[in-house]
Image (cartoon, grey):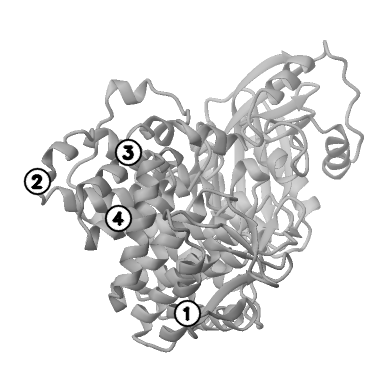
Amino acid sequence: MNLNQSARKLFPAFIQSTENLKPCRVFLSASDMKTRAVTRHAVADNPADAWNAALEKLKVAFGSKKLFILRADWVIETQSVTFEEFIRRVEKTRRNYFRHGLALDNFKIAFTESEINGNALLFKDGKEGSGNGIFRPDRFEEYCKIRFDCSFPVLEPSDFVEIFTTAGVFISEEEPKPLPINANGIAAGHRAISHLDSEIILNLARSGARYLARQVQPSGRFIYGHWPCFDKNVPNYNTLRHFSSIFAMLDVYSTYRMGEMKIGGAITRAIKYGVKNFIKYRTLPDGTEAAYVYEPDANEIKLGALGLMLIMLVKHAELMKTKKYYPLMESVARAIFTMQKTDGSFVHVLNANDFSVKEEFRIVYYDGEAIFGLMRLYSINHDELLLQASERAFKKFIDSDHWKNHDHWLSYSVNELTLYKPAREYFEFGINNFLGFLPFIYHRDTQFPTLLELMMAADSMLERMKTMPELADLLAKVPLEDFYSALEARAKNMMSGFFYPELAMFFKRPESIVGGFFIRHHGFRVRIDDVEHFLSGFVAYRRYLARRTHEPQPSEKLLNGKAEGTGLFNIQIGN
């Protein structure tokens, strides 16, 4: 596919959408998906003239590279504000959530939202400062020289600039017919999707699994993550996320019977690498052996990593119909037992050299991960010690109102526990884990993929409660229409965390991130656990879609709610 051919195919869709625009301001962007998109723009009194002018500029700038995707964006709304007001708005907006372009000098110099995002023009590196945007004159200067071959103009606070919104359309090797691009809302900047269906979710899940498989190196170790604006790898590693990412790949692989050797091979390599490099054995006083998952770089043992290894290995045993890792799983369970105190609570972190306590508590997720792991192992070997340890832990959870953390792993673990121990207090805990949290789940603007996991595990529990008349009064406490409205709102929000080609093209090396999932407010970071959480949520959501009978309608109370945490969760997201 070359630029001229694609332009001819895209032009009619552009003209149809812009025929009444006077003046017409059009941006054309092209990418081979190996390097960042090249963008050029033009302004004219009629759309055809604007298109032709922009296309001629693009041909020169794009050169002889092989085209993969061509995108057209046109301005549909502008607002004139002072430069001071522009900066103020950026600084009041969550990082990477300023959804406008910027134009100077009557659009002689202009940057679309996609260019601003892809070149990190409005956010600061690292964790310094607030979570909001910041104007970066150094980056605007750098990109202005690339884009316009000039310096970024010196602006006074009272000088006027234009902020603008665009609509668009694109064509690519994968999408040979023009597809429209959203203009507004959380989904602005990528293809318009009117509704979610099973096929869309299936394709997203498969794409994410393939992405994870590509991150598994020949050794079995993952490429941990990418900062896509600069094409830099995330340098650290996390054994917990190593195993949880394998689990997500297995979940997709088993659910959709993909049968792709690249994914199957990646799973095998990653498991072997983890077992070889992240296990530390210890002989217990009774002569049995315990296997601890440890972090070599930090020389520590994290409770959550033990739980996630169990979850992954049980899934592998079920899928592959193998007992190969049964002895290892039982040894990992014994290690978890050694980290449980008499009151049911857990020690979170040990020193790997002598198994002494390093931290009594580190993060709320570890408890639920450990119990979910124990209960998943119980599902295949029915060892009563696993159930007893889980019940001791949940007694402590209930006594301490642990549900106030609204942890997705608690949702997973209580759902699993109630399969085998359907006690009323466990169902009540599971309901409390989400009940006061629905407004946050419904309104939260960031992707937050673990919220969908929380809701899907809770949905599984509620479905069983519907068949249990003795729990009818508990079930009656749940506003089911609001529950399912929040669940679906979360899934729709997450659709905008996928690196479609028309988004990925604006980052430094598109081919390294396309098909993965990102966290927008973390600099569009793509990390293996980010992808993992999207996959696990979408796999479960597709099962929900298969039995959905109607589109839920949110209540006025939910619609008028706010994206605020409750109880301990406020502290958690604050930290």
Q: Quadrant of the N terminus?
A: bottom right
* Of residues 75 and 189, the one drawn nearer to the viewer in this rendering: 189
Looking at the image, tell me whether mark 1 or mark 4 is earlier in sequence order. 1
Mark 1, other Cα within 10 Å: few <14 / some 14–19 / many ≥20: many
Crowd class of label 2 (few under 14; some 14 to 19; many from 20; radius 10 Å): few
In the rendered view, would you say 113 is above or below 103? below
Visible residue check, residue 162: yes
Separation of residues labelled 3 and 1 (CA atoms): 33 Å
Q: Position of residue 279 (x, y in %)?
A: 60, 78
Q: How far apart are the alpha carbons under marks 2 and 1? A: 38 Å
Give the alpha-carbon distance from disc 1 to disc 4, as whole Å: 24 Å
Image quarter where the C terminus lies is top right
Identified at 68% across, 64% down, the residue is: 237
Please tell me the numbered disc located at residue 432. Answer: 3
Tag 2: amino acid? Glu
Label 2: element kind: helix
Instruction: Tell me where residue 512 sits by quadrant.
Output: bottom right
Q: Identify the mark nearer the N-term, 4 or 3.
A: 4
Does any portion of residue 255 appear in the rendered image? Answer: no
Is the C-beta separation of discs 2 and 1 under 8 Å? no
Precedes in sequence: disc 2 or disc 3: 3
Callout 1: helix, strand or loop? helix
Q: Position of residue 282 (x, y in %)?
A: 58, 80
Name which of mark 2 and mark 1 comes first in the sequence.
Answer: 1
Marks 2 and 4, Cα distance to the nearest angstrom?
17 Å
Which amino acid, mark 1?
Ser
Q: Residue under circle 4? A: 415
Q: Earlier in the sequence, mark 3 or mark 1?
A: 1
The mark lying in front, picked from 2 and 1, is 1
Q: Position of residue 545 (x, y in %)?
A: 27, 52
Instruction: Check disc 1 and report the residue beneath it.
Output: 331
